[in-house]
């Protein structure tokens, strides 16, 4: 049974049997539109089972997290006490390995570990005021925790030595974004007309390309495209997470995708489809449908989040429309019913 705190988590499952490690899954909350008078954060996630799969091994997470505010907001976060000063946003995609049932379990465990590590660390003020050192430490601990939990599950269940998963997560503490990455799920930053990939695939194929042994244009298909040298679990040694940090601008978007999507759509196609615009749910749906139209046999998953600062016109219209302006100056809604003198 999900606890009361779990019911406030914005996370998604697609029918995988919940495990004792993560009781909150099974409650679908596919999007989070979080806003205040100044800021707006729109996010959405979507996943679809591949034609060659009996069960979806992908999983994703969208989770707002409270930040402990200090004396001053982070640069660019807006007014003190605003939404993006007091809230961090955690986005993640995991692609399970080891077969349908095992892969689905591994991706669930990884995201539970990520969620728990982030919530516990921030609650314990391990990342005071969203400090860069603290938040990077949160992500590192989450990856190692997920790896050890998956290895423990594999030892507990005979015949599951290949239990493993990829994991790509972005933690936004405005205006900074911290990305942790293991495997071949990907993270992109969408800014204006550009879509820039900020992760590198941890596959044999990409390693051969990096070493200059083969050209990307002449890489035999499917030579090493889906052979991972870095994962959580999978019987391997401890993962070697890729960590990236950067600064976002108003209007930027974060896109996370599993290889079932990116194997079907090139970066150029992804950029064209994202540039077409629209609300986050529409962007996610457009990408999933395009990958399916290319005959995507693998599970495909996408998460998209956009961070906006309202114009002065929007703020005024929002304030007047909510009646806050009238209540403030006339006293409407006060218990005694009398206006201010």
Image (tube, rainbow, N blue to C red):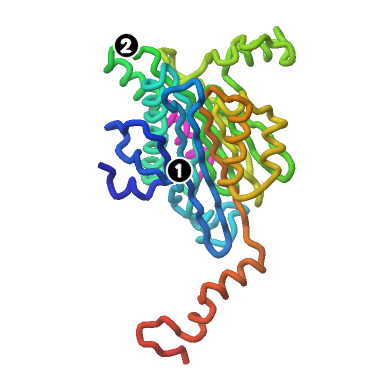
Residue at horizontal 46%, vertical 22%?
Answer: 53
Q: Nearer the viewer, residue 48 or 22?
A: 48
Q: CA distance from mark 1 to mark 2?
A: 39 Å
SS under mark 1 = loop
Rendered position, 243 above or below 285: above
Q: Nearer the viewer, residue 280 or 130?
A: 280
Image quarter where the N terminus lies is top left
Residue at the spot of label 1: 127
Residue 159 has which mark? 2
SS under mark 2 = loop
Residue at horizontal 60%, vertical 15%?
Answer: 225
Which residues, given as a range, are shown in magenta?
Answer: 130-145
Q: Nearer the viewer, residue 216 or 260?
A: 260
Secondary structure, magenta segment, majority class = helix
Q: How many marks?
A: 2
Rendered position, 216 above or below 29: above
């Amino acid at each position: 049974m999900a606890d009361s705190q779990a019911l406030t988590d914005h996370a998604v499952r697609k029918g995988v049997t919940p495990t004792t490690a993560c009781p909150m899954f099974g409650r679908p909350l596919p999007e989070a539109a979080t806003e205040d008078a100044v800021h707006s954060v729109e996010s959405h996630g979507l996943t679809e089972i591949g034609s060659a799969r009996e069960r979806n091994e992908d999983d994703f997470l969208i989770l707002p997290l409270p930040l402990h505010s200090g004396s001053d907001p982070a640069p660019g976060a807006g007014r003190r006490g605003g939404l993006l000063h007091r809230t961090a946003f955690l986005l993640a995609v995991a692609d399970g390995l080891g077969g349908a049932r095992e892969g689905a379990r591994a991706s669930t465990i990884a995201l539970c570990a990520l969620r728990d590590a982030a919530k516990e660390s921030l609650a314990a003020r391990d990342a005071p005021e969203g400090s860069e050192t603290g938040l990077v430490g949160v992500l590192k601990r989450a990856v190692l925790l997920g790896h050890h939990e998956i290895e423990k599950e594999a030892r507990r269940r005979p015949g599951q030595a290949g239990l493993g998963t990829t994991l790509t997560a972005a933690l936004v503490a405005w205006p900074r974004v911290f990305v942790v990455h293991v495997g071949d799920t990907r993270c992109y930053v969408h800014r204006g007309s550009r879509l820039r990939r900020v992760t590198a695939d941890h596959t044999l194929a990409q390693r051969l390309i990096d070493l200059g042994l083969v050209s990307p244009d002449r890489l035999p298909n499917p030579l090493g495209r889906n052979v991972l040298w870095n994962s959580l679990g999978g019987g391997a040694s401890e993962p070697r997470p890729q960590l990236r940090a950067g600064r976002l601008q108003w209007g930027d978007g974060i896109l996370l995708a599993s290889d079932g999507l990116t194997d079907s759509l090139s970066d150029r196609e992804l950029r064209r489809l994202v540039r077409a615009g629209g609300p986050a749910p529409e962007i996610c749906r457009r990408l999933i449908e395009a990958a399916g139209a290319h005959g995507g046999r693998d599970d495909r998953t996408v998460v998209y989040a956009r961070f906006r600062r309202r114009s002065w016109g929007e703020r005024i219209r929002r304030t007047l429309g909510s009646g806050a302006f009238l209540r403030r100056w006339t006293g409407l809604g006060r218990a005694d019913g009398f206006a201010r003198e």
